[in-house]
Amino acid sequence: MAGAQSQAMLEKMELRQSYRNVWHTDLTNAVAADLPWCCLSLWCGPCVSYMLRRRALYNDMSRYVCCAGYMPCSGKCGESQCPEVCLATEVFCCFGNSVASTRFLLQDEFNIQTTQCDNCIIAFMFFLQQLACICSLVACIVGNSELSEVAHVISCMSNLVYWTVCSCMQVICTPTFHPCQLSLGIQVIPFLIM
């Protein structure tokens, strides 16, 4: 069962490389694209993540699955009985997974590819987190105060990059609606360019 699930995830990742649509902006330009929303998602990230997932599900919480079906816990958290509570728990306890899952959900639904630059930024974020963890462990084992200070600085840098990248991802995933088309009942998908 786990092998089949892993294979399905790998196939989905490979399929994602052939997507042809692109986000309206990339991570490097997200702040300039919508500074107020970027600030809101930086200071109140879980609230924005909750709202974005609801929008990505078209406010139909019967479609909700924990982490949008991309994590091993998906479908095993009692989501069908109380999806709002499960989503709230997800965005507060697994914030990074929540942001990434919403991004993947939109990418898969609208065939949106990730740019090489975005991939590099995300990889750098993961690298810093791993480096911070390794340095903290080594500092703890060795007991060296200078190494402990270095580990603390790297950990602070890692947290800064993590929150910035998550905030920018939420700016990119923010679906907005054109006022003229709202009256016509037509949904616009401005986070992508065909």
Image (cartoon, rainbow, N blue to C red):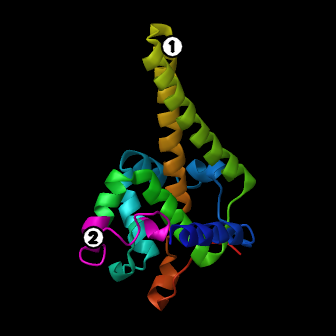
Q: Does the magenta segment cover residue 76?
A: yes
| Residue drawn where x is 50% and y is 66% of the image | 70
Numbered circle sitting on residue 147:
1
Judged by depth in the image, the label closer to the viewer, 1 or 2, is 1
- For the point 51% across and 58% down, the residue is 100
Magenta-highlighted residues: 67-86
Above-or-below relation of 65 to 35: below
Magenta run includes residue 160: no
Residue 107: % across, % down: 60, 70
How busy is the neighbourhood of tag 2: few (under 14 within 10 Å), some, or many (20 plus)? some
Classify mark 1: helix, strand or loop. helix
Can residue 190 be seen at all in this image of the molecule?
A: no
Magenta region's main secondary structure? loop
Callout 1–callout 2 Cβ contact below 8 Å: no
Q: Which residue is mark 2?
A: 84
Return the disc, 1 or 2, that comes first in the chain's sequence: 2
**In the image shown, does 179 or 168 lie closer to the viewer?**
168
Residue 138 visible in image = yes
Count of numbered circles on the image: 2
Q: Residue at x 36, y 57 (%)?
A: 91
Q: How dense is the environment of label 1, judged by Cα within 10 Å: few (below 14), some, or many (20 and up)?
A: some
Give me the residue at 35% from left, 59% from top.
90
Q: Secondary structure at mark 2?
A: helix
Position of 180 compared to 89: left or right? right
Could you tell me the amino acid type at mark 1?
Leu
Q: Residue furthest bottom?
A: 184
Question: Could you tell me residue 185's position as x and y percent?
Answer: 47, 89
